[in-house]
Image (cartoon, coloured by chain):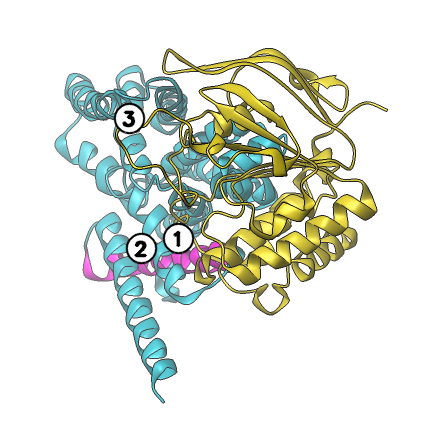
Chain colours: A yellow, B cyan
Amino acid sequence: MTSPLTARGVEVDLAGGPVVRGVDLTVGTGEFVTLLGANGSGKSTLVRALVGLIPARGSIELFGTPLARFRDRWRLGYVPQRPGSSSGVPATVREVVTSGRLAHRPLLGFASRSDRAAVDEAISHVRLGAKADQPITELSGGQQQRAYIARALVGDPQLLVMDEPTAGVDAESASVLASLIGHLVDDHGMAVLMVAHELGPMRALVDRAVVIDAGRVSYEGPVDGVRHDHAHDHPHIGAPERVRPVPEEGPLG
Amino acid sequence: MTDLLAYDFMRYALIAAIVTGLAAPAVGTYIVQRRLALLGDGLGHVALTGVALGLLTNVAPTLTAVAVAVLGAVAIELLRTYAKTSGDVALAMLFYGGIAGGVMLVNLAGESASTLNSFLFGSITTIDAADLVTVAILGLVVVLLSIGLSPQLFAVCQDEDHARVSGVPVRLYTMFIAVLAAVTITVAMRTVGLLLVSALMVVPVAAAQQLTRSFRSTHLVAMVLGLLAAVGGVVASYEIDTQPGPTIVMLALAVFAVAAVTRGVVSLRRSAP
């Protein structure tokens, strides 16, 4: 069986400079892989390249198909880094989650009964049933993140890619997400690739940790084997060593 | 009111107002969602060059305006995509060129200032039957596409990255929204005029937002408010003998003010013990 994600020798340049260098990465069916690294290590850039948002060299295959020719988009669920500002027009949780069904829908026409059922189910899985018809901007940060994860899960993806889903998320939201994602990985064989600073309750789910440092893989193995300074051995000459992970990071992460 | 309908020009103007009032907020909702509220202004400027080309070459100005505004929309989207740092200035220059070129060409065509004025601020007496057919067809196409493609357009405007990963051709749809806006500007040119058309795309949406909580209800309420402002403005402009464009826009702003006050009162009551 082909792996949901196989990447070989991935290289990304941004603004003329190299950001990701020769990264190999595989995520197998039912496997939970986390990408760790300091600010600016290139881990978010790597993930954006893996889902096709920015151009990269090297080979990236999703479910055995090269990224450029990958058409079964419903198989890939994506949770971007939390958008900084809301859009100009209000949108409810239900509307945002419904937009996650697009890959299942024909070009024209209303959402079908199965679309609506999937949306209701995804919203209740992230325990936002009571907030489904509220504008998403009225929710707390953690609740908004749950809504964006529901949008990624509503299409029944086989590979879920999340960019810092736990950054700045309250404890309740983090544990709701961990139990939901644990269920999908264990019982449905969903594969997960998650960029994180802080694993929190997700830590128990992680099968393999990959640490990115200056655009290269510096460690790959069990999460317990990640040395505490791994994520922080970025050369901050003279700066005090960070003891705690940084909750937010810039767009290039 | 019934005596208004005795005049052909008034019937034409009212039909044009209905189509314009629905079409402008139908597209405008996406434009506001993408935070491009000033896009319509720029396209209106560019469309003026199209009008002038029509006057100069004796082709119906509505058709040349559509063609030039659509080209302008495509150029603007390409600039926004590829000229990231200098895009802002490039857009501004495109807009200045549009209005300056338009006014010069109108002068060269030997047209009077009042002709120019009627395109800039609308004129209910200049709509003829041929214009009306063009306006009605284009306006209906805009309304149908804005509603029919709303799942895709919403997804693109809400979160471009997520839409792109979901396989939505984002660049195509953002271009499409700009083209819809360009067509709408031509539709609205006869009633609201090129300089104020953008207001009818933005103000009803801003007013609707005061009263609604979802995207879909904002979209629909904005279209209803746009319709009321456009029809009310045309009727009022006939009654008090003003140009329709400014009358429609002032009415839309009044609707916004009422909506904003209503919202304030409602939220005060809610927060009161």
**Looking at the image, residue B242 lies above or below residue A74:** below
Residue A80 percent across, percent down from the top left = 52, 39
Residue A113 percent across, percent down from the top left = 77, 55
Residue A73, picture quadrant: top right
What label does residue B234 carry, if any? 2
The residues tagged by marks 1 and 2 sit, at their Cα atoms, a distance apart of 7 Å
- Element on which disc 2 rests: helix
Question: Residue beneath label 3, please?
Answer: A237
Q: Residue B238 colored magenta?
A: yes
**Residue at image x 51%, y 34%?**
B161
A89 vs A180, nearest the viewer: A180
- Element on which disc 3 rests: loop
**Looking at the image, residue A95 lies above or below residue A237:** below
Residue most extreme to the bottom: B273
* Side of A214 where B255 appears, left or right: left
Kind of residue at disc 2: Val
* Side of A23 where B271 appears, left or right: left
Q: For the magenta stretch, what is the residue range?
A: B217-241
Q: In the rendered view of the protein, which quadrant contains the N terminus of chain A?
A: top right
